[in-house]
Image (spheres, grey):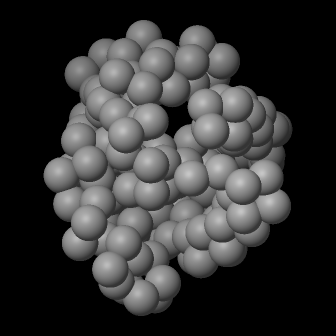
Amino acid sequence: MRWLIALSIIFAVLLSVIPVPFDWRIWRPEFVALLVVYWATYSPEHFGVFSAWVCGILLDVVSLATLGEHALGLMIVAYIANLAYQRIRSYALWQQSAWTLILIGVYQLFTNWASGLVGKSIETIDFLGAAALTALFWPLLVVVLRKIKIRFRLP
């Protein structure tokens, strides 16, 4: 199970640093945060706040962001998802997608707050468009990772 978590996080980090045009940066889905929400919800015994912190530090290093910027947001999101994982899993996929929209919005608010502390601020709330786009990926992610878990007979 841990190899699947590590492989998916590495893939998400690579997707997060693919170059996109400057105007499209605010529409880039938050792939790492999406996987943190997924693993904290569907495998809380293997993925917790410390794992989210490690993912955040990795994303900070790879994206050349201020150290701890993404780690703070991912830790908060993982904590909330770990608290409510039983409730989230009982929802339908579209309701889980709405829950993901809220969590990704919280993540982006904290990362933008941390960026603002060091002088890199975003003056509009357009960055929440990426949260909506990320939430649209949720049903696809759940279905694909369920099939992978079934295929390899993972718990």
The residue drawn where x is 61% and y is 56% is 29
Residue 102: tell me if it is visible.
yes
Q: Quadrant of residue 32?
A: top right
Give the answer, above or below, for where 89 lies relative to 121: below
Of residues 140 and 69, the one nearer the viewer is 140
How far from the left and from the top, in percent, is residue 130?
53, 61
Q: Kindly indicate the quadrant of the structure image that contains residue 104.
A: bottom left
- What x and y, as percent, mark residue 154? 65, 51
Q: How many marks?
A: 0
Q: Residue at left 67%, top 74%?
A: 143
State the residue at coordinates (62%, 39%): 1
Q: Is residue 42 above or below residue 66?
A: below
Residue shown at 26%/48% (left/top)? 82
Task: Look at the picture and state if 136 lies above or below 33.
Answer: below
Frontmost residue, 129 versus 87: 87
Query: In the picture provided, is 101 more to the left or to the right than 87?
Result: right
Q: Is residue 73 visible?
A: no
- The residue nearer to you, when weighing 61 against 151, is 151
On the image, the x and y values in percent for residue 109 come to: 29, 47
Query: Residue 142: x, y in percent?
Result: 60, 69
For residue 151, side relative to residue 46 (left or right): right
